[in-house]
Image (tube, rainbow, N blue to C red):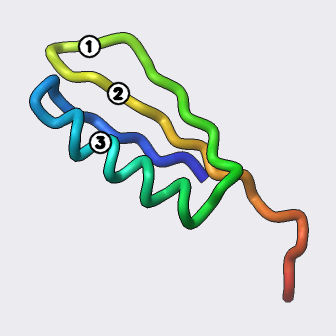
Amino acid sequence: MKIRVTYTENEKGKKAQHEAAVKSLFPDTKVRETAPKDGFLHTVLTVPMSQKTTK
């Protein structure tokens, strides 16, 4: 599952809180920062899927 967070320079604190919350629920989360585009910064949080599935 991928979660994309779009924010401005002023909202970096809120982005950090969001990232910490996702990492507390899913410790294996990978974080990738992308280049600024149109005045916004982007972070992509990738949560790995569990191997165990139930039907």
Q: What element does badge 2 sit on?
A: strand
User: Which quadrant of the figure has residue 35?
Assistant: top left
Q: What element does badge 3 sit on?
A: helix
> Residue lying furthest bottom in this view?
55
Q: Which residue is mark 3?
A: 15
Q: Amino acid at mark 3?
A: Lys
Q: Rounded to the nearest whole Å, what is the CA distance between mark 2 and mark 3?
A: 10 Å
Q: What element does badge 1 sit on?
A: strand
Q: Which residue is mark 1?
A: 37
Question: Disc 3 or disc 1, which is closer to the eye?
Answer: 3
Rendered location of residue 2, percent (x, y): 55, 46
Left or right: 5 in relation to 49 = left
Against 46, residue 33 (above or below) is: above
User: Which quadrant of the figure has residue 24?
Assistant: bottom right
User: Which quadrant of the figure has residue 21?
Assistant: bottom left
The residue positioned 81% from the left and 64% from the top of the image is 50
Disc 1 packing (10 Å; few <14; some 14–19; many ≥20)? few
